[in-house]
Amino acid sequence: MDFLRDAQEAAYRELTAPDAWIPYPDTEPALHALRERGLRIAIVSDFACGRRSGQAAGLSEPC
């Protein structure tokens, strides 16, 4: 399967690019509203770069 190696690496680069993960416009206000109400928020992902979405939504600090 060596012929797929370049395609796999290109796909991974695309999926891990910071601009590939842009949250919906209402994500940040919704998460902040929940935090203001005292709810603890966690972003769970099975992808290594899942934290980027949270950081883009303004959740770079623990809730």
Image: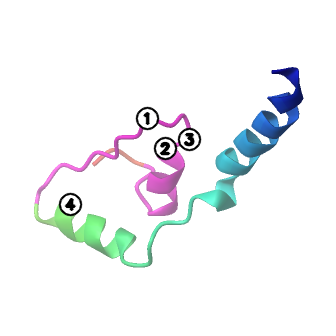
- For the residues marked 4 and 2, what is the alpha-carbon distance in whole angstroms? 19 Å
Mark number for residue 50?
Answer: 2
Looking at the rendered structure, which numbered label has been put on residue 49?
3
Mark 1: give few (<14), some (14-19) or many (20+) Cα within 10 Å. few
Residue 8 location, quadrant: top right
- First of labels 1, 4 by sequence position: 4
Label 2 near label 1: C-beta < 8 Å? Answer: yes
Q: Which residue is mark 4?
A: 35
Separation of residues labelled 2 and 3 (CA atoms): 4 Å
* 63 left or right of 12 in image: left
Question: Identity of the amino acid at label 4?
Answer: Arg
Disc 3/disc 1 C-alpha distance (Å): 9 Å
- Could you tell me which secondary element the residue under label 4 belongs to? helix
CB within 8 Å, label 2 to label 3: yes
Determine the main secondary structure of the stretch shown in magenta: loop
Residue neighbourhood size for the residue with mark 2, other residues' Cα within 10 Å, grouped as few (<14), some (14–19), many (≥20)? some
In front of the other: 17 or 1 = 1
Dot 4: few (<14), some (14–19), or many (≥20) neighbours within 10 Å? few
